Amino acid sequence: MKINKIKRVNDARIDELELKMVTDFDHVECPLVHRFTNKMYIREIFMPKGTLVTSKIHKSQHPYCVSKGVVSVKIDSGEWVTIEAPFTGITEVGTRRVLLIHEDCIWTTFHVNKDNCKDISTLENRLLYKYKNKLLKNISTKTINFKKEAIL
């Protein structure tokens, strides 16, 4: 099976967007739910309508589904794509998304978890590349989620 890898050429532009989001706009909570089955880790995020979100960078190819809502998604230099629930897709290695949430959205990812690990920090280290937005320097950001109304 061939695994496609995203060639990220727009990290600098996404970093600039994140800096603008962090310094100029109100933070929005996007709660995560973690679920486990035998050898599977399921990660679900709720993103409210009107939110602009940037994702982490993914190390693995894995399925995802949008079970609720409407979201416009941009991956690196690709075009904006609008996804409407129900939708199932595949995340490619190296994916870093910018998401504009048009309707309350539930996005779920599914990951192989061979040793049934339940430590979220360990799982994130396995699944997500360590990437530091150098423009944020001393600003602590666990996630980058902000109200888009302030941006538009």
Image (tube, helix red, strand yellow):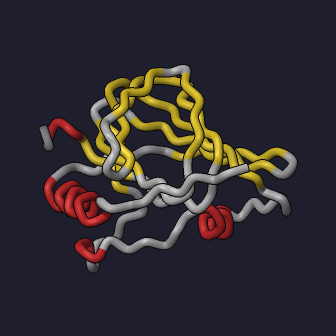
- Residue 59: percent from the left, percent from the top? 58, 62
Front residue of 149/12: it is 12
Front residue of 98/152: it is 98
Which residue sits at x=53%, y=57%?
Answer: 5
Which residue sits at x=55%, y=63%?
Answer: 128
- Residue 28: percent from the left, percent from the top? 33, 45
Name the side, left or right, on which 87 lies relative to 81: right
Name the side, left or right, on which 49 lies relative to 31: left
Which residue sits at x=25%, y=66%?
Answer: 12
The number of callouts visible is 0
Which residue sits at x=22%, y=56%?
Answer: 17
Quarter of the picture holding the C terminus: top left
Name the side, left or right, on which 32 lies relative to 22: right
- Residue 126: percent from the left, percent from the top? 65, 67
* 44 versus 94 height, above or below: above
**Picture quarter containing residue 69?**
top left
**Picture quarter containing residue 58?**
bottom right
